[in-house]
Amino acid sequence: MLAYDFDWSIVMRPQFLSLLVDGLGRTVALAAISGALSFVLGALLAAARLSPSAVVRTPANALVEVVRNVPSLFWILFFYFVLPELMPAPAAKSLHEWPSYAFVSGVLGLSIDNGAYLSDILRNGMARIPKGQREAAASCGMSIWQECVWVLCPQSLRMMMPAIANRMVHNFKNTSLCIAIALPELTWATQQIESITFKGLEVTAVSTLTYATGSLLIAFALSRLSARQTAASTTARRHEEQCDACR
């Protein structure tokens, strides 16, 4: 017989359920906003790292290397604790008094961390695109940024979607690191309920299941998107072949 006395009704009590629901909402918001920002940052860094100009390429490579070799938690702590101290006193005071600054710090920390890894994934995808397509884009007068948006990113996105999906799942799980700045997300809510009730197993099990379900949903949604993109690309290629045959 187990000595532990399970009480699963704890997680359904209004005050504790409210904590979990609010925490989950912040977790989802953190993952969604930082995921979008990190993708934009990753695409920009990938384009910069493929630039023929060393002035653009070198700082981008240096930034990615620094971010990738520093723990993810550091960036969250940096934006929350260090950044305000590097600003003038009035600005620092305003940031510390801003109720949403912990959330913003979490978003910025997660975005720069995930963006560095996404830049590697997107750069590898862009590098696999035939050189002729890049030369054609350049001959049409496209800048490196236009080439990235209209030629490189759409194709590399299709090729690298499984790896991108893995990073987005990882980013979702990394939202739990925001407990370090007392942001009331799902892990923080779990810890609060445990400290009040001393019933850690029940609430931890529910939170674990929630994280697992969220991760699976993200992976499934992105895999479906990848499948649709592949199907659309295949259909378009067949139409082109049929048109060429008719000529």
Image (cartoon, rainbow, N blue to C red):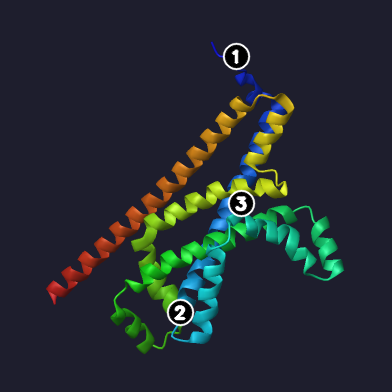
**Residue in view at x 49 percent, y 78 percent:** 48
Q: Mark 1 points at which residue?
A: 3
Q: How crowded is mark 1: few (under 14 residues within 10 Å), some or many (20 or more)?
A: few
Amino acid on which disc 1 is placed: Ala
Q: In this view, does 221 lie to the left or right of 107?
A: left
Q: Mark 2 points at which residue?
A: 146
Cα–Cα gap, marks 3 and 1: 38 Å
Amino acid on which disc 3 is placed: Leu
**Residue in view at x 58 percent, y 56 percent:** 72
Q: Position of residue 35 (x, y in %)?
A: 54, 57
Amino acid on which disc 2 is placed: Gln
Mark 1 vs 2, N-terminal side: 1
Looking at the rendered structure, the secondary structure element under dot 1 is loop
Q: Residues within 10 Å of mark 3 (few under 14, many from 20)?
A: many
Callout count: 3
Looking at the rendered structure, the secondary structure element under dot 3 is helix
| Residue 30: image tag | 3
**Residue in view at x 62 percent, y 18 percent:** 7
* Residue sitting at the far top: 1
| Residue 84: image tag | none
